[in-house]
Image (cartoon, rainbow, N blue to C red):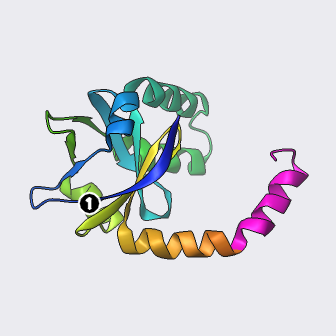
Amino acid sequence: MLIGEYIHSLDDKNRVSLPAKFRKELGKKLVVTRGLEHSLFVYSLPEWKKISEKLSELGMGASGTRGFNRFLLAGAVEADVDSAGRILVPDFLKKFAGLKGKVVMAGVGSRVEVWDEKAWTAYKSQIEREADALAERLGGVGAL
């Protein structure tokens, strides 16, 4: 399980180091794609296969489904983890997530999310303020 929060720097060649803990679980080849809230999602290849299969099962009838498939799948790239434990973030994904300098790698169960540090700090503050209300709603559906 991918958990925890780590701050790393994006270098001038658009490379960022994966935390050693994440490298173990993600493997040497992974998938990076556009995520929600202008973050990036990073998946291991086996996990990506599950996600893409689920998306393909949704069909093409609804425009929202087609749009989300395009958003996630067309924005995906395979990335190799180099000998120093870094991955290359393509320019279009860097721009999408607004990555500048320091980034946060957040383990969220089956994926890692990559955020610009300032965006993460703002998002985290908002979620922390709403945590009790979110827990209440999730408890109502049996999630907690």
Residue 102 shown left or right of residue 69 in the figure: left
Residue 126, percent across and down?
A: 60, 75
Residue 94, percent across and down?
A: 26, 60
| Furthest-right residue in this view | 140
Query: What residue is rendered at 44% in x and 31% in y?
Result: 48
Name the residue that disc number 1 marks.
94
Nearest the eye: 106 or 137: 106
Query: What residue is rendered at 82% in x and 47% in y?
Result: 144
Query: What residue is rendered at 9% in x and 56% in y?
Result: 13
Residue 61, percent across and down?
A: 61, 39
The answer to which quarter of the image holds residue 14 is bottom left
Amino acid type, residue under disc 1 in the picture: Lys
Query: What residue is rendered at 38% in x and 37% in y?
Result: 21
Magenta segment's dominant SS is helix
In the rendered structure, does residue 8 fall within the stretch colored magenta?
A: no
Nearest the eye: 77 or 22: 22
Crowding around mark 1 (Cα neighbors within 10 Å: few <14, some 14 to 19, many 20+) is many
Nearest the eye: 122 or 36: 122
Nearest the eye: 52 or 31: 31
When the figure is inspected, residue 83 is found, relative to residue 76, above or below; the finding is above
Which structural element holds mark 1?
A: helix
When the figure is inspected, residue 134 is found, relative to residue 20, above or below; the finding is below
In the rendered structure, does residue 132 fall within the stretch colored magenta?
A: yes
Residue 2, percent across and down?
A: 49, 39
Residue 134 shown left or right of residue 48 in the figure: right
Residue 136 shown left or right of residue 129 in the figure: right
Q: Which residues are magenta?
A: 130-144
